[in-house]
Image (tube, rainbow, N blue to C red):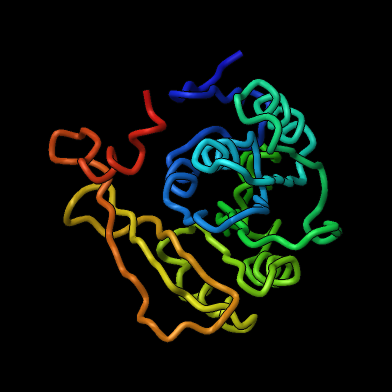
Amino acid sequence: MSYFSFKKFKVEHDNSSMKVGTDAVLLGAWCDISDATNILEIGCGCGVISLIVAQRTMSTNIIGIDIDKDSVVEANINFQQSPFSAKLKAAHCDLYDYQPHIKFNCILSNPPYFTEETLSPSLRRSLARNSKSLPFSDLVKHAKRMMTDKASLQVIIPFSEIDNFISETNKQGLTLVRRTNIVTKKGKTPKRVLLHFVNFVVEDPVKNETLVLSNHNNERSENYKKLTKDLYI
């Protein structure tokens, strides 16, 4: 059994379709949950994003859903073994069929993004990472139906897909308020982008930032260390 240890919890990820990765840690540490009381994570995998969010907030109801049954089983094990078990739950369900009894004021997702016609040898991993299993249009549409009037949708996606994703959010009346480009090293082209949308009109300009992950010595940058200081050992 393998697991990833953080300062306040550990994550088993042997049986999940997706392992603990930098993208998930970034979204969990970066997302704005200051006013969130009911949070939904779409595609929770082993539950690492939900766990990070649970560590960062005092009193919140956090639900993770995933189409992969083994991932949900493992996520619930991770939740139960954490200090935050009382506010965490994972459910095995298809987003298309999910009918929660509440609306959420914060929705998070590290969505599938591979678009290659040929899937990788591992079908479960491919489904977790291939955008054909959950097109951006469907992700945004179903997020919208489950959002309160003052809710947010926050995601991490490939930088190359930003125009496609924003196009879909525009169709659903969501407004981009914050964007952080993720660069592995200074001078490199961004590989990922963190996006924060709200379910209402905002007149203020979008807050644009860039986060460089590594310095010239291949060590974590000061800004990355600052963002994750309460997480990594």
Q: Is residue 130 left or right of residue 133?
A: left
Q: Is residue 226 left or right of residue 186?
A: right
Q: Is residue 71 left or right of residue 196?
A: right
Vertical placement of residue 14 versus 110, above or below: above
Asked if one can make out residue 168 in the rendered structure from this viewpoint, the answer is no
Farthest left residue? 216
Farthest top residue? 1
Vertical placement of residue 36 versus 85, above or below: below
Q: Residue at x 29, y 63 (%)?
A: 209
Q: Residue at x 66, y 74 (%)?
A: 149
Q: Residue at x 38, y 28 (%)?
A: 232
Vertical placement of residue 130 versus 79, above or below: below
Asked if one can make out residue 187 in the rendered structure from this viewpoint, the answer is yes
Residue 173 in percent (x, y) is at: 61, 83
Using the rendered view, name the quadrant where residue 107 is placed.
bottom right
Residue 230 in percent (x, y) is at: 38, 33
Figure label count? 0
Quadrant (top left/top right/bottom left/bottom right) for the N terminus: top right
Residue 160 in percent (x, y) is at: 42, 66
Quadrant (top left/top right/bottom left/bottom right) for the C terminus: top left
Q: Residue at x 77, y 46 (%)?
A: 67
Residue 125 in percent (x, y) is at: 64, 40
Between 45 and 230, the residue placed more toward the observer is 230
